Image (spheres, helix red, strand yellow):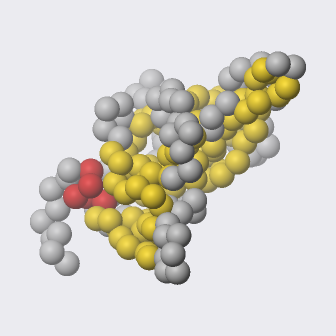
Amino acid sequence: MPGEGAVFLCDPTNLPGSRRGVYIAVSLASIRTIANKPRFRPFQLWWLELDPLDQSIVDAGMLTAPSCSDERFPSFARSPAGTPCLAYLSRSPGTQTMRLMLAPIAFDGRNGSPKVREGQVREVSEDVAATLPVFSSDGRWLCEIRRNLSTTTTVSRIEVGRALGESTPDAAR
């Protein structure tokens, strides 16, 4: 695990699709000491491989590239073209607004561990509510809740294949 000492894990979710073991994804923050006070580093998305009884972590690694942004609420699906993909929220330092991110995932051919395909992370919406992104059951749509400080909150959907740049013959549906 990263850093020295304690880490904080939250937002666990199953990560389907690997050839090996059971994987979950988490938001992980390590603790550092500044002026003799413990401080959390930004949350980053990590994968954890569990033992066959789901009782111990046997391997772990970063799911996304190192970043100074907080990364929270990972959610997984397969796009209509079959691409495993990850949606999550990201917040830049010093800001209060969350951005909805979408990226394809690749599985390492040697050990089966998951990794976001570098350079293919897309910001698909900004100023979203801090809630878990939800995919439709067929992976075609990604729902977002737009943060609105006035009286209404809006829910809308994003076409996953289009956002990933995949060709989808039935995109008009």
Instruction: Compare residues 96 and 38 and report the one nearer the observer.
Output: 96
What residue is shown at x 72% (from left), y 42% (from top)?
Answer: 9
Q: Look at the picture and state if 162 lies above or below 23.
A: below
What residue is shown at x 57% (from left), y 59% (from top)?
Answer: 130
Q: Is residue 81 visible?
A: no
Outermost residue to the left: 169
What residue is shown at x 17% (from left), y 69% (from top)?
Answer: 171
Q: Position of residue 69 (x, y in %)?
A: 53, 36
Within the image, what quadrant is residue 27 found in? top right
Which quadrant: the C terminus? bottom left
Q: Look at the picture and state if 2 lies above or below 103.
A: above
Asked if residue 157 lies left or right of residue 98, the reply is: left
Outermost residue to the right: 36
Q: Is residue 97 visible?
A: yes
Please tell me how many numbered marks the rendered image carries: 0
Asked if residue 72 lies left or right of residue 164, the reply is: right
Q: Position of residue 115 (x, y in %)?
A: 45, 34
Asked if residue 167 lies left or right of residue 108, the reply is: left
Instruction: Compare residues 22 and 61 and report the one nearer the observer.
Output: 61
Q: Position of residue 109 (x, y in %)?
A: 40, 28
Outermost residue to the front: 150
Which quadrant: the N terminus? top right
Q: Look at the picture and state if 34 lies above or below 19.
A: above
What residue is shown at x 43% (from left), y 29% (from top)?
Answer: 108
Within the image, what quadrant is residue 110 found in? top left
Q: Where is residue 12 in the image (x, y as percent from the top left)?
A: 66, 51
Asked if residue 44 lies left or right of residue 40, the reply is: left
